[in-house]
Image: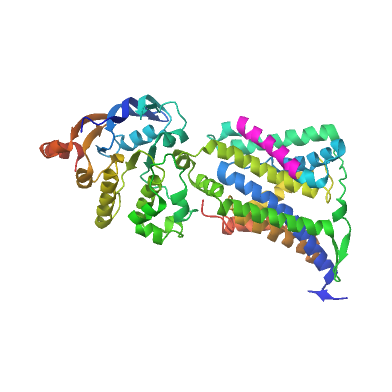
Amino acid sequence: MMMIFGIPIQAFLGQLLIGLINGSFYAMLSLGLAIIFGLLRVINFAHGAQYMMGAFVGFLLLSWIGINYWLALLVAPVIVGITGIVIERFALRRLYNLDHLYGLLFTFGLALVIEGGFRYVYGSSGQPYATPDILSGGVNLGFMYLPIYRGWVVVASLIVCIGTWLLIEKTKLGAYLRAATENPTLVQSFGINVPFLLTLTYGLGTALAALAGIMAAPIYQVSPLMGSNLVIVVFAIVVVGGMGSIMGAIVTGYMLGILEGLTKVFYPEASNIVIFVIMAIVLLVRPAGLFGRDV
Amino acid sequence: MTDRQSLLSVRGLNAWYDESHILHGVDLEVREGETVTILGRNGMGKTTTLRSIMGILRKRTGAIDFDGKDLMNRPLHHTARAGIGFVPEERGIFATLSVEENLMLPPIVSKNGMSVDEIYELFPNLKERRSSQGTKLSGGEQQMLAMARMLRTGVKMLLLDEPTEGLAPVIVQRIGEILQTLKQRGMTILLVEQNFRFASKISDRFYVMDHGVVTEGFDVAELPARMDTLHEVLGV
């Protein structure tokens, strides 16, 4: 058997793949959080619940009206994004002039209400979501067996992350977003409707969470609490990457996902805490985060 | 000068920062094509006046009419669309945007704006450095960029807050030339300026502010006769 650092190479690559897949979800979720925090200065604790909603909406669309996975990839984020727009427009907006803590508390409460509501209706056990036919099965790469769906998740999340990054760094809308992140009042004095931009951004952030959720549905089960564990890890990642840094969120998401996977190979006992240990170290050494500008 | 039409009229303007009452009934008038400078010591409400006209400061009462439109009950982003461009004291160049992105950021509000080519002709440095990060420019270049991006939009009037602050004399002179060019093109300018010599070369009229009210207004022709009292009021 081939060995790498004293570990069978199959186990090494297997955990690397699991790390990469987790990292894909971390990246997509922390990206949305970073965009929302950058412009709205709201720490969106409801992000995990919105990820769960994406998976549930996909699941319900399939079981009620037979909308398949591919269509759900489009429809679920739109539906959840609209709920985000409604939340921003009627609730979050009232909190912008208060301390950031209020936004955090509000979205935290919102997450509890959403997750509690789904648990009340659907119970806390998971619902299966079948892998779409074309992506089921796997390929033997020689050194390991790659389930096709998991490969697809890695590729799709890379496309989503790079696409979002391009949208923010290379388009006019992105220039508005970046400028408004720096100085919203001045941007609005130029004649740009900043309140609308904020609504749109929250909608986009929640839609990204929902997209991650529907993509996660065939891998993890669809359950009301699927986001609540994940969101804590994702917050740690955003802190490591640097609050509000888009590229930082993406790179850190993949990096820490892979690191977590490799920890499972070399020292499994630490795999659940390695991300938090790194967060603590980064906070001590470089409080603005690895990619953050000084706040 | 007096036969020109009034473009901006401010009457009885009061404004507050939180609980502190800064403006106590400001009255002023700017006619089309004029350059008017507000003089006054620090903390007398000059910047607050510009910010209140623009609508950045929302806690305000009184009347502000611009080009026949009432500006009091409009959201901030409608002021620029009415035709006013604001260049803040801190210039407001965005660090995460390139020079060109900074230039192209404000939306066009009328067809009367300058083309990008015309702007680069007026500000050759900006063309040279158009792909640099906005805040990598020197202070003078940042001030020029802050003005240039307003010229593209086609606003009728510029509110300039201390455009020469902290700049070397040769740059101040250059900014003076640019403002002269804008005047010739018919731009209306309301200026807040501590640099009295600079202001006296380009202004048509002056207002003096003291403790949140306009205490006097006069034409540039009356300036020599008023120098002594002005020195006293301004402490220059």
Residue at left offset 61%, top offset 34%: A92
Q: Looking at this view, is A29 or A256 the one in front?
A: A29
The quadrant in which residue A126 appears is: top right
**Image height check: is B161 above or below B134?**
above
Question: Residue A93 at x, y = what percent?
Answer: 58, 33
Question: Residue A118 at x, y = what percent?
Answer: 80, 35
The C terminus of chain B lies in quadrant: top left
Which span is picked out in magenta?
Answer: A74-90
The quadrant in which residue A148 appears is: bottom right
Residue at left offset 37%, top offset 55%: B120
Q: Magenta span: helix, strand or loop, mainly?
A: helix
**Image height check: is A274 above or below A183?**
below
The N terminus of chain B lies in quadrant: top left
**Image height check: is A214 above or below B215?**
below
Residue B74 on the magenta segment: no
Residue at left offset 48%, top offset 44%: A183
Residue A271 seen from this side: no
Question: Residue A144 at x, y = what percent?
Answer: 85, 67
Q: Looking at this view, is A67 or A289 the one in front?
A: A67
The quadrant in which residue A62 appears is: top right
Residue A84 on the magenta segment: yes
Q: Looking at this view, is B235 or B130 the one in front?
A: B130
